[in-house]
């Protein structure tokens, strides 16, 4: 099933706004974004991730030191 896609060329901003209204689309660039507060679990998880990365880097360095 191959559907032919319509190609719509939009020349200016008013045409874009008219197109979005006619298609029932929402302009998300005009919607204010709120910053989400991280929970304690997320903060702890990221700290454990940082510690894990540091430990892995140290183990790789130790591994390469033994090879050389």
Image: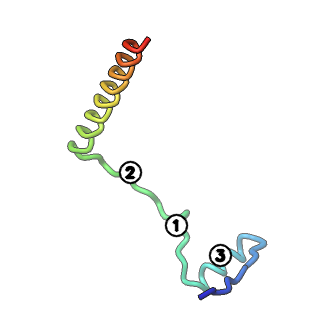
Residue at the spot x=28%, y=33% of the render? 47
Residue 34: give x, y in percent of width and height.
40, 55
In contact (CB < 8 Å): disc 1 and disc 2: no
Q: Nearer the viewer, residue 32 or 64?
A: 64
Q: Residues within 10 Å of mark 3 (few under 14, many from 20)?
A: some
Residue at the spot x=33%, y=22% of the render? 59
Residue at the spot x=66%, y=80% of the render? 18
Q: CA distance from mark 2 to mark 3?
A: 27 Å
Q: Which residue is mark 1?
A: 28
Considering every residue shown, the one lying at the far right of the view is 11
Q: Residues within 10 Å of mark 2 (few under 14, many from 20)?
A: few
Secondary structure under the numbered disc 2 in the rendered image = loop
Secondary structure under the numbered disc 3 in the rendered image = helix
Residue 43: image quadrant is: top left
Residue 31: give x, y in percent of width and height.
49, 64
Considering every residue shown, the one lying at the far left of the view is 41
| Horizontal relation, residue 51 to residue 9: left or right | left
Considering every residue shown, the one lying at the far front of the view is 67
Counting labels gives 3
Q: Say which quadrant the N terminus sits in.
A: bottom right
Vertical side of 50 occupied by 34: above or below: below
Q: Which residue is mark 2?
A: 35
Question: Nearer the N terminus, badge 1 or badge 2?
Answer: 1
Residue 7: numbered disc: none
Residue 16: give x, y in percent of width and height.
68, 74
Q: Say which quadrant the C terminus sits in.
A: top left
Vertical side of 11 occupied by 33: above or below: above
Q: Residues within 10 Å of mark 1 (few under 14, many from 20)?
A: few
Residue at the spot x=37%, y=24% of the render? 57
Q: Which residue is mark 3?
A: 17
Q: CA distance from mark 1 to mark 3?
A: 12 Å
Residue 2: give x, y in percent of width and height.
63, 86
């Amino acid at each position: 099933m191959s559907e032919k896609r319509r190609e719509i060329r939009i020349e200016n901003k008013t045409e874009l706004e008219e197109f979005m209204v006619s298609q029932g689309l929402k302009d998300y660039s005009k919607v204010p974004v709120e910053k989400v507060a991280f929970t304690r679990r997320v903060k702890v998880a990221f700290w454990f991730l940082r510690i894990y990365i540091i430990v892995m880097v140290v183990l790789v360095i130790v591994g390469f030191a033994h090879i050389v």
